[in-house]
Image (cartoon, rainbow, N blue to C red):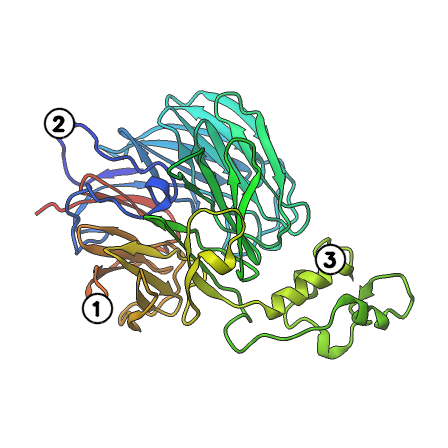
Amino acid sequence: MRTLLYPLIAVGLFGADWPQLRGPNGSGLCPSCGQLPTEFGPQKNVLWKTELPAGKSSPVLVGDRIFLTASEGDDLITMCLSRTTGKVQWRRSIPAARREAQNSLNHRAAPTAVTDGKSVFVFFADFGLAAYDFEGKQRWQLPLGPFNSQHGVVASPVYADGKVILVFDTDTDAYIIAVDSDSGKIAWKTPRQVINGYSTPIIYRPARGPAQVIAPGSYQLTAYSIVDGEPLWFVRGLTCQPKSAPTIAGDILYFNGWTTGNDAGQQVDLPAFAEVIAADANHDGKLSQPELPQPWQPTGTWRAIDLDRDGFLNEREWTFFRTRRSSRNGLLAVKLGGSGDVTDTHVLWRYEKSLPDVPAPLVYKDVVFLFRSGGIATTLDAQTGKVLKQARLTGALDDYYASPIGVDGKVYIASEHGKVVVLRAAGDWEILAINEFDSDIYATPAISEGKMYIRTRNALYAIRSLN
């Protein structure tokens, strides 16, 4: 059901689009979006509200259209709404091919759509990739999977130069693919030696040469040529389960990675497989859980390190587990470009305290904004990594899964339980308002032309100043 709370008498031209997760190239910024209200809520500064099926994907905007995904039962739904009125223009569904295992915080409609300005591309882990034109006609389908992922595949697709890019950082047979946006055929596919990745990639356009796709993964961030998927350069030192998305400001990439048990001081030095395999009682070259000595047992579940789910640990699985226990969480500032291993030459600084789990870093006005679950906000100098301020978001001590956005000299961040905090965008930030919705929020808001589109668990709100 659609509720129109403020009449419009004319439809104007639309300004900047918001074509993917976190907007133009995943920046979370909209420099030309005009003013947004500081105070709003279900009954305040709402242009319209449209009820939606369940889903956790974020809205994307192009022209007068809003695209998002949802699900009902085994129907995987793509929807197009009017930005002007919130009216549903069309709704299409694909039957799920299966039900992938996933974390309770995940959702079968969690990945956000991406658009090239002519078509919209949607990915569902329970089916694969599909493309629709703006009138709702399906252009093509590309079934993918099934996937062996501990928490479920959740990274969103991105678009560049006629290709839709998807990353599948699964526990076995991980890969990155580029799909031709016109035909739906795979242009290239490159294996990745990673596990447990949940991060959406980003596009980097160097001054010379073709665009690059930068994809964080377990323990390593890698740049690929968009032409053929060839790996170009990489940075070591990431944590095991990256969930945040990277962001680019100027010639620097910022990426935050956090995993339970990898904070500074929690590292454990485990022996190499050659020593561990001595505990192999039946000499079959792999270890069951009872065979593994207690000091080397995982602190979490056996399933988390038994990557192929066969009940045993082989050398590959032990090596990943050993690396996981010795890795460190961190926010890295990386100078873009180079060739091969650029860890020692291109990592400009690293920060390791009070890091977010899922929300991506926001770089706005030369300040890095971080939001950790529990309501802890940290600002860093974008050039040096120096801490400018760290404090609790009093009144919103909640968990955070949406990413922050920056516009109009303000930073907006939505908490899990529906509190949208507005900060003054400065190193010494202050809380300007805490706006409460009546439903959970997992989606990152979209912004354009003085309007913000906020998806809650069961509705999409168009917010603008009505004063």
Mark 2 vs mark 3: which is more N-terminal?
Answer: 2
What is the x, y in percent for residue 433?
19, 62
Question: Residue 274 vs residue 318: left or right?
Answer: right
Residue 373, x across and y down, in percent: 40, 66
Residue bearing mark 3: 316
The residue singled out by tag 1 in the image is 428
Nearer to us of marks 2 and 3 is 3
C-alpha distance separating marks 2 and 1: 41 Å
Measured as percent of width and height from the top left, residue 98 is found at 63, 40
Task: Relative to 141, say whether 247 is above or below.
Answer: below
**Residue 444 seen in the current view:** no
* C-alpha separation, residue under disc 1 versus residue under disc 3: 46 Å
- Toward the right, the furthest residue is 282
* Residue, disc 2: 10
The amino acid type, in three-letter code, at marker 3 is: Arg
Rendered residue at 53%/51% (across/down): 234
Give the vertical position of 422 relative to 245 (above or below): below
Q: Are marks 2 and 3 in contact (CB under 8 Å)?
A: no
